[in-house]
Amino acid sequence: MSYVDEVLERVIAKNPAEPEFHQAVKEVLNSLRPVIEANEEKYRKEALLERLTEPDRQFKFRVPWVDDNGQVQVNTGYRVQFNNSIGPYKGGLRLHPSVNLGIIKFLGFEQIFKNSLTSLPIGGGKGGSDFDPKGKSDREVMAFCQSFMTELCKYIGADTDVPAGDIGTGAREIGYMFGQYKKIRGVYEGVLTGKGLSYGGSLVRTEATGYGLLYLTEEMLKCNGHEMKDKVICVSGSGNVAIYATQKAHQLGAKVVTVSDSTGWVYDPEGIDVALLKEVKEVKRARLTEYAAARPSAEYHEGRGVWTVKCDVALPCATQNELLLEDAKELVANGCIAVAEGANMPTTLDATEYLQQNKVLFAPGKAANAGGVATSALEMSQNSERLSWSFEEVDSKLKNIMVNIFHNLDDAAKRYGKEGDYVAGANIAGFEKVAEAMIAQGVC
Ligand code: NDP
């Protein structure tokens, strides 16, 4: 049996009931086969893949807090510190009822390669809780965040592990967590990114993932003889990534005609009105029905359906496994030329294969959405320097990083005879640097 197959079997046996983690490891290791096979003896002796698929450590803890009725509630908190061979652990905190250890491990594993691809010195980690901030008062969210950080603060630090936002964790939650960290640890340091501008945050961090997605997609289109201007785009999600992807797409001359949330989706042939979407989602924290009610050109539909709309480019920006094989077939039949993942692992493995077989340009999330973590690393640099850079400076660094990421993965794919396979290219380019650092640092 090949080394890759042996490790895949072992990962599944050792981590039962963690399907998302299995899926992420399978996707990465399968596409690394040419690299692993070329170095099989060395990597086997080093047990490199066994070490890479086993987190450095993982924390699971109780998060008790009191709701507005005086009732004690209990959630579970997680932090998985996966790999710090190229820098301190870095990765977001997801607050969503679906969160469990397997989901955090899949996200932390992917984060290793994503962070490596940015070319910045950051390792891979991820955390979160099954707490749902939706429908909670500000005081309840604060109570949860303080309790969560009371435990988490023992394991993180500006040079150790620097969490950030993710689904359900925005500026409000980061603020409450930062305040509690400072209070307990008594140090003012860049321990979290995605902070408010008044206390060490970076300009462009809010926009970074969505903007970065568009910078990379534009470069991918350009290198394949297309341009962004006048493209019709379907976006899913209506959170941080989706909103700023839509904004940048419009700035680049394309037209986004859909957005969605967990209950339904909107088709707006005139192009999504970003100011209205921000008002509904960022200010009122309301459903998309409110967008449709305020916008005569928009149609609201219950349930799933974004990928049935004819488009040139699809940008899944909501959550994992939201673009299925049947959706991929629909996109191909409708003439879609490119899919770039704003969310983490939104496309199932069979859907990805179908898109690639049908010559749809496909940019995987670990490359396409790396703009968020890259700008988080720029926030860390500014915190260390005790300086703040201008919007233009950060935005231009972000653009350079995304363009470089595309060329790195394009080159890596070509080096292994997989031209145009950006999934393989991203995994190979991300892996090579981490593998080299792990081997150089000995058995640890
Ligand atoms: P937000 O919480 O801001 O938005 C998430 C969006 O996805 C919301 O519209 C939400 O709808 C929708 N959604 C969430 N879960 C589901 C579900 N199960 N089914 C359908 N829709 C769902 O999160 P972000 O925009 O920050 O993150 C989106 C994705 O991007 C995630 O995969 C995240 O890991 C990834 N990502 C985010 C980065 C960032 O900087 N924010 C960086 C890199 C990756 P509703 O409002 O109804 O819940």
Image (tube, rainbow, N blue to C red):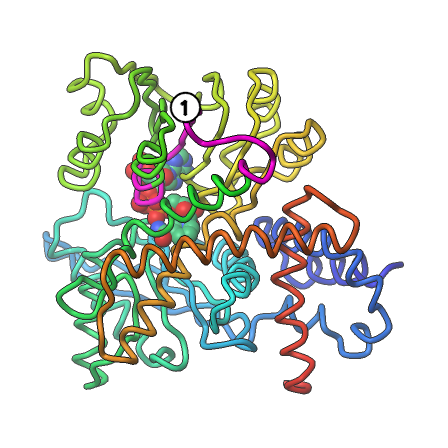
User: Which quarter of the picture shows residue 444?
Assistant: bottom right
Q: Is residue 211 above or below residue 435?
A: above
- The residues colored magenta run 221-244
Q: Is residue 226 magenta?
A: yes
Residue at x 32% of width, y 32% of height:
250
Q: In this view, does 135 lie above or below 144?
A: above
Is residue 396 visible to us here?
A: yes
Q: Quadrant of the N terminus?
A: bottom right
Indicate left or right for 237 with 441 as reference.
left
Residue at x 54% of width, y 36% of height:
221
Residue at x 64% of width, y 60% of height:
429
Q: Does the magenta stretch include residue 20?
A: no
Q: In this view, does 61 lie above or below 240?
A: below
Q: Find residue 321 and report its horizontal and vertical position in percent.
A: 52, 38
User: Which quarter of the picture shows residue 60?
Assistant: bottom left
Q: Name the residue under label 1.
A: 230
Q: Find residue 296 and report its horizontal and vertical position in percent.
A: 19, 12
Q: Find residue 45 and report its horizontal and vertical position in percent.
A: 82, 78
Is residue 97 visible to us here?
A: no
Frontmost residue, 402 versus 333: 402
Q: Find residue 163 and report its horizontal and vertical position in percent.
A: 36, 67
In what quadrant does ligand 1 lie?
top left
Q: Is mark 1 on a helix, strand or loop?
A: loop
Q: How crowded is mark 1: few (under 14 residues within 10 Å), some or many (20 or more)?
A: some
Indicate left or right for 14 with 18 as reference.
right
Mark 1 belongs to which amino acid? Answer: Asp
